[in-house]
Amino acid sequence: MALPKRFRQAFRMLALLLGTIILYIAAVLAYGTYDDWRPPAETALEPEQISEENPVRDSILSFVTWNLGYGGLGEESDFFYDHGNMFYSGGRMIRAPREFVEKNIAGDTLFVQTTQSDFFLFQEVDVDSRRSYYINQFREIGEELPGFAAFFAPNYKVSRVPIPLLEPWAAYGKVLSGLATYSRFQPYESLRLQLPGSFSWPTRIFQLDRCVAVHRYRVANGKELVVMNVHNSAYDADGGLKRQQMAFLRELLLEEYEKGHYVMVGGDWNQCPPYFRFDMFMPGNTQGYTQINIDPEFLPPDWKWVYDPTMPTNRKIRTPYVAGESFVTIIDFFLISPNIRARTVKCLDQQFRFSDHQPVWVEVELL
C-alpha cells in the first residue's frame, strides 16, 4: 500500500536535509585536507624586532612563561570544545565577545609594561585570527617592549576551522597563532622545530601543529644559552602524542647540554611536573578531569623542574571561572639544565582574569 502523499513529501524533505548535511561535511573535510598546513621539520625564524644587546653579559637572568589564551579565555569565558563536542556548541562560547578579547589583550600589554623580565615566553598568541577579531597580539605586545628581540613561531595555521560542524554560521573560522618569544638580548639563531606526532585524520587537519621555538644566544663567558619556548599537545586523552613530543625534546635537550650550553625551557607542557598531584589544590574534587605527570626518569636527576607549588597556573574552561569551584592545577613551568641554578620562582596570581593560564616568573643564575 502506497504511503500517503504527505508522508512521501516529508520523507523526501528529510532525505534532502540529510543529503545536504552529508555533502556539507564531505566538502568541509575535502577542503580541510587540501588546505592542511604541513610545516617543515625545521624553519628559520625571522625577527619582528631586533635587540642591540649581544652577547648575554649577565649571569643572573629572569624569565616569564605564560599561555595568553589568544585573548579569548579570560575569567568570563567557557569553551564549547572542552565538553568534547565538535558538532554543536550547546549554547556554550565559541568565541568570546570582542569586549572580553580587548580587555584580555589590554591585560597582556599591561603585564609586560609592569613586569621586569629579560625573557618573555608566551604561548597561544594570535596574529590573524577570527576568534580574536584579527587583532595582532604579537605586534601589540612587542610595541610595549622596545629594544627587545621578538620572534613568532606559528603552530596553528588554518584558513577555516569549521567546528562546530552543525553550526556553520558560527564556525570558529580562520586561525593564525603560535609561540611568541621576546628577549632583551639578540639571538644569533632562532628556529622553529616541528614536534612529532599528530591526531588521526580528520581531527588533525583542524588541530595545532605543535612545535618548539629554539633561540640561541652567545654568552660573554664563551658559552651559549639555548632558550626554548614549548607548547605540548592538549586533548590528548592517552598522552600518546605528548610522549612522542617529550622523547623528541629529551634528545634535543641532552644534545645541547652535552655541547656545554646552558639550556632553559619554559612553556605550557599540558602535563604536571614529576610527582606533583594534579588535584593538589582540590583534593578528590577532580570534576572528571585528569592530567598526566612528566616521567620522573625523563632526564637525569641534576636537571630541575622549576615551578611554584603554592599557586595554580591553569584553570579548566567548561564554565566561566569561579574561585574555589573551577578546577585548577599546574601545567606551566620551567626546566633548567644542571649548569643553571634557580634563585626564585613565583606564579603571579591574577585570578585568571586575562587567560585560563597564569604567568610564572623565575630568576636564575648561569653557573
Image: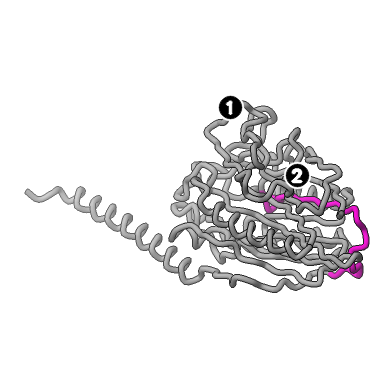
Which residue shows up at 63% across the image and 32% down it?
A: 326
Q: Mark 2 points at which residue?
A: 306
* Numbered label attached to residue 86: none
Please state, as top left, top right, bottom left or bottom right, where the C terminus lies in the image: bottom right
Residue 140 visible? no
Dot 1 or dot 2: first in sequence order is: 1
Is 51 part of what is drawn in magenta? yes
**Residue 29 location (% of width, % of height):** 43, 63
Q: What's the coloring here? A: one colour
Quadrant hosting residue 133: bottom right
Which residue shows up at 74% across the image and 40% down it?
A: 353
Is 232 part of what is drawn in magenta? no
Say which of 283 and 12 sits in front: 283
Q: What is the magenta range?
A: 50-72
**Residue 74 location (% of width, % of height):** 69, 43
Which residue shows up at 62% across the image and 26% down it?
A: 283
Quadrant hosting residue 179: bottom right
Q: Mark 1 points at which residue?
A: 285
Kind of residue at disc 1:
Asn
Say which of 124 and 89 sits in front: 124
**Residue 212 location (% of width, % of height):** 66, 61
Q: What element carries label 2?
A: strand
| Residue that lies at the very extreme toward the left in this rendered image | 1
